């Protein structure tokens, strides 16, 4: 699955790690981790985050409905944040998904480092400005879903913190308050290496580059390797689980680098140099340092590409593990799942997202490979690749991501059948918002109901055969 690049396994070392945690202070996992060559590890920096007053996660009150148990077959849908701006839209969404026979909602509560819930850490989403006082989108989703028996997972966008729109106005938005946490493309490495991240030009240049290269990058990304960015993500997840005990799980999205062009920010380059310096011969290290002093700021990653790729992959996995520790400590055993690039080789080489290792280590409860393709043969291949990656689970930790917008109603139904046939534990449809606004269904039918009747009317291929009735034809 990993392709030609040879990566030394470090699953055992990672599996033994523990993280000391408290409700109001969390100690970040060390940046330096298991080596890819036989060397002695040194502990990384310890970062403590002051998160302010965060309530203890309460037990369900009398009469309160806790998160339902995971369904035998997940029939889920991603709900984009645009649906969360209006109470009536939320009520309609829950009703329509339940009537369509779906059982799991993945609700985008952190879209671009903003909050569609009551957050102690991040500003309310701009789309909620002017909403009725007391309106809490996530609380309403949970209330409505509990009444209809639907599981709700908090869909958290991890590294993508702003899109291509003009920069956010809120001064406490991550992009404004902590520009030093942002990832930098290689093209801007030399220009921004000595720039002050607090200066207006730093964020402007990053944003201009993203807009100019919008076909390659979705916006501004927080660096997976930066201790502050990682600690913020962990704190966001802990805050969510503390405030909303009805959550069935946390669903991470964009837990990756945007591409191999990132991260050439100075903090990342310096952290990598510290990591790599003890892993190359002393004479070579001295030569690289001399070139660095002469202004060649990318010399260390450029001259050590395998170490550089492996280090970046580890930053993503360490971020996942940090979130996992918080989820694992939460009462009620919420699930930790992740949306991932469906092709495991592309995910690893192009985004440093080694979700096969996450499954092998038991670090996620499920992955949702985003197999967004109109080609059914390609979709089937991706499902088989996911099943192979889930060796221990045989596909039971795979929620197949179906891109409704890439095919028609009948094609989507066939893809659901292909996922079930591959042994997937369920499917997640992208997205509710597209299905209700643009999905074409027969006259008099709603898209999701029409799809559900076509996709799920046949028995699950994992179901045991029914006893034969001798009197039946």
Image (spheres, rainbow, N blue to C red):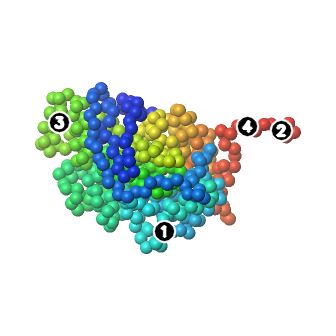
Q: Residue at left 53%, top 51%?
A: 248
Kindly indicate the quadrant of the structure image that contains residue 128.
bottom left
Kindly indicate the quadrant of the structure image that contains residue 269.
top left
Q: Is residue 40 left or right of residue 140?
A: left
- Between the residue at mark 2 and the residue at mark 3, the CA separation in whole angstroms equals 77 Å
Where is residue 255? Give x, y as percent.
40, 47
Question: Closer to us: mark 2 or mark 1?
Answer: 1
Task: Using the image, tell me which numbered label, if any, was put on residue 469.
Answer: 2
Residue 268 visible at all: yes
Quarter of the rendering occupied by the C terminus:
top right
Q: Residues within 10 Å of mark 2 (few under 14, many from 20)?
A: few
Name of the residue lying farthest toward the top: 38
Q: Residue at left 19%, top 54%?
A: 195
Q: Earlier in the sequence, mark 3 or mark 4?
A: 3
Q: Which residue is mark 3?
A: 288
Q: Earlier in the sequence, mark 2 or mark 1?
A: 1
Task: Identify the element where label 2 is drawn.
Answer: loop
């Amino acid at each position: 699955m990993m392709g030609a690049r040879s990566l030394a396994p470090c699953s055992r070392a990672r599996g033994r790690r523990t993280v000391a945690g408290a409700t109001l202070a969390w100690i970040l996992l060390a940046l330096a981790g298991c080596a890819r060559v036989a060397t002695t590890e040194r502990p990384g920096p310890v970062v403590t985050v002051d998160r302010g007053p965060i309530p203890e996660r309460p037990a369900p009150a009398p009469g309160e409905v806790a998160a339902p148990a995971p369904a035998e077959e997940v029939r889920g849908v991603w709900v984009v944040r645009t649906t969360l701006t209006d109470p009536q839209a939320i009520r309609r969404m829950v009703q329509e998904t339940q009537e369509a026979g779906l059982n799991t909602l993945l609700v985008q509560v952190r879209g671009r480092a903003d909050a569609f819930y009551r957050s102690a850490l991040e500003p309310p989403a701009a789309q909620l400005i002017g909403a009725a006082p007391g309106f809490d989108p996530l609380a309403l989703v949970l209330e409505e879903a509990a009444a209809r028996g639907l599981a709700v997972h908090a869909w958290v966008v991890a590294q993508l913190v702003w899109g291509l729109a003009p920069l956010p106005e809120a001064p406490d938005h991550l992009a404004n308050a902590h520009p030093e946490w942002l990832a930098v493309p290689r093209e801007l490495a030399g220009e921004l290496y000595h720039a002050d991240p607090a200066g207006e030009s730093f964020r402007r240049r990053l944003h201009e580059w993203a807009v100019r290269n919008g076909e390659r990058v979705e916006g501004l990304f927080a660096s997976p390797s930066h201790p502050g960015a990682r600690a913020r993500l962990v704190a966001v997840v802990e805050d969510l689980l503390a405030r909303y005990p009805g959550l069935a799980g946390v669903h991470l999205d964009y837990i990756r680098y945007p591409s191999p062009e990132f991260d050439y920010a100075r903090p990342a380059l310096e952290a990598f140099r510290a990591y790599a310096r003890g892993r190359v011969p002393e004479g070579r290290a001295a030569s690289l340092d001399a070139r660095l002093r002469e202004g060649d700021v990318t010399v260390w990653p450029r001259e050590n590409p395998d170490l550089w790729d492996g280090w970046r992959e580890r930053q993503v996995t360490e971020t996942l593990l940090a979130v996992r520790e918080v989820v694992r400590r939460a009462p009620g055993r919420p699930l930790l799942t992740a949306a991932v690039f469906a092709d495991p080789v592309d995910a690893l080489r192009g985004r440093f997202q080694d979700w096969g290792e996450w499954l092998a280590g038991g670090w996620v409860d499920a992955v949702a490979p985003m197999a967004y393709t109109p080609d059914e043969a390609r979709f089937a291949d991706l499902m088989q690749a996911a099943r192979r990656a889930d060796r221990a689970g045989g596909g039971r930790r795979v929620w197949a991501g179906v891109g409704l917008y890439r095919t028609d109603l009948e094609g989507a139904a066939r893809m659901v059948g292909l996922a079930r046939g591959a042994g997937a534990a369920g499917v997640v449809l992208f997205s509710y918002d597209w299905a209700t606004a643009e999905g074409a269904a027969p006259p008099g039918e709603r898209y999701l109901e029409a799809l559900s009747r076509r996709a799920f009317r046949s028995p699950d291929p994992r179901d045991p055969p029914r006893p034969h009735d001798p009197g039946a034809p």
